[in-house]
Amino acid sequence: MSLVVAADRSGVGKTTVTAAILASLQNRPGLVQSFKVGPDYIDPMFHTRVTQRPCRNLDPILTSDGYVQTLFQTHIQDADYALVEGVMGLFDGAMGQGGRGSTAHIAQLLNVPIVLVLDCSRLSDSIAALVHGYTSFDQRLQIAGVILNRVGSDRHFESLKAALTPLSVKILGVLHRQPSIHIPDRHLGLVPINELEGAEGLVQQLAEVGNRCFDWPALLPLLATPATGQPTAKKAPAPQEWGIPIQPSALTSPQSSLSAGPIRIAIAQDAAFNFYYADNLEQLSHLDAELVYWSPLKDQTLPPNIHGLYLGGGFPEMFAAKLAENIGVRQALKIVIQQGLPTYAECGGLMYLCKSLQTLEGQAFPMVGVLPTTVKMAKRLTLGYRCAIATQDTPLLTVGTQVWGHEFHHSQLHPSSSAPIYKFSGDVSSRSVSQPEGWHLYNLHASYVHLHWGHRSELPQRFVQQCQIYQLNL
């Protein structure tokens, strides 16, 4: 079994509650595996920092129902406890898809119970109507209980408890207002935990909250996986600077005969670039690629002897001045990409490769300059799933390939593209279907569209093959 942490809407404290449960579990015997519903990168970073295991994204829009089920079953095999953090409100899914991709959809796919987190700061007796609605709306769901968050006082709790008593709903946790615990946010959500000063102290605070605020005799059996028996001994995390150890997965792919030796792929990993799905990196590793982590912020040179480059998303706009100061790396990157180094850049990586980046404050900084466009931060948010069709061959895709991806950014390119990768189909919400997207120059695939390779193993296979061809031509 496992447990899904859900809520009636966004902003009620799912991440804080989830982190408190994980932090408290981490201080107990046994291994803990966490999951996050949807395409988010930032919440999984908090999970991973606490559990020292990669948090897995459960997103049937970017992957498939079957992949989500297989991924979940695979990664709870060696765990004693498992916890899934939901997304938005319980029934909120992809736009126009009838709840597909929602927390409720995932709970049904996995056949696991739900605990509903409620912000009680402006509620009293009305909580009963709210809980009754959520517990009775879809009888297929298993609502194990509720967690009352932001309770004002003992008297407030007694009022809430009395209102819920006729419903026979179990209260699995009570969290009073915690002014000392504050996770700051900015334009794309929470500030990543690797940027927070005193992160270890925050994790300890969350563990203390978890220890005293939950009904552990009732909660532990819900969190226990089928493997739970004698708790598994915790192991030290693998020595990766970026904090997500590579672990074996169910992926198996044939090796290519093109290789003249080990393929080395540089992975940008620092405070500016840290949006990666663990599954994507594992697939490269299972194709016998050596992943070489480096920092465009701190390193003065590129890693030696590389045959490919992966520039993930992140927050280059927050570190634009420091990225601009690293002139040697910017110049070296431009040269190797122009010489044909297979490069895959998503969102923040795309922004870094532009001629310049203008911040929210209006100050422009020079970037790598391999793309003949500038990027400017804007108040408008571009957000949503994308059904995209490749318009030309790239290091990752062949023309005509259809993929599902996700966009989430506050920046715009000027001009948008003169060498687009994608055309869109289906619901694209905040952007025009006719608007070109992405850049393909030299041997570069650069796009705002984040891809989860998941069940599409042909995508990393093609990328590794392009790296092998590049290696042979050196």
Image (cartoon, rainbow, N blue to C red):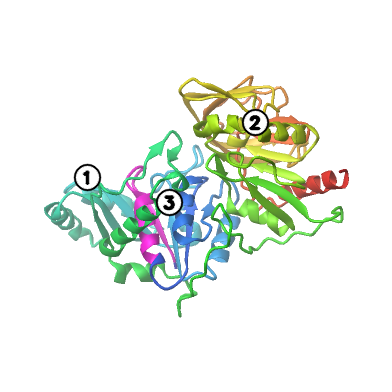
Q: Residue furthest bottom?
A: 230
Nearer mark to the viewer, of 2 and 1: 2
- Cβ–Cβ below 8 Å for labels 2 and 1? no
Q: In the structure shown, which secondary structural element does the residue marked by tag 3 occupy?
A: loop
Q: Estimate the x, y position of residue 338 in percent, counting from the top left.
A: 78, 31
Q: Magenta stretch?
A: 2-25
Residue 327: image tag: 2
For marks 2 and 3, give the CA distance.
41 Å
Quick check: is 314 in the magenta stretch?
Answer: no
Q: Is residue 388 above or below residue 290?
A: above
- Identify the residue at image location x=49%, y=23%: 378
User: Disc 1 residue type?
Assistant: Ser
Q: Estimate the x, y position of residue 377 in percent, counting from the top left.
A: 51, 25
The local crowd at label 1, few if under 14, some if 14 to 19, many if 20 or more residues have their Cα within 10 Å, is: some
Nearer mark to the viewer, of 2 and 3: 2
Residue carrying label 3? 86
- Cβ–Cβ below 8 Å for labels 2 and 3? no
Disc on the earlier residue, 3 or 1: 3
For marks 3 and 1, give the CA distance.
21 Å
- Cβ–Cβ below 8 Å for labels 3 and 1? no
Is residue 119 toward the left or the right of residue 39 in the image? Answer: left
- The image quarter containing residue 145 is bottom left
Q: In the structure shown, which secondary structural element does the residue marked by tag 1 occupy?
A: loop
Residue carrying label 1? 121
Q: Estimate the x, y position of residue 18 in percent, counting from the top left.
A: 38, 55
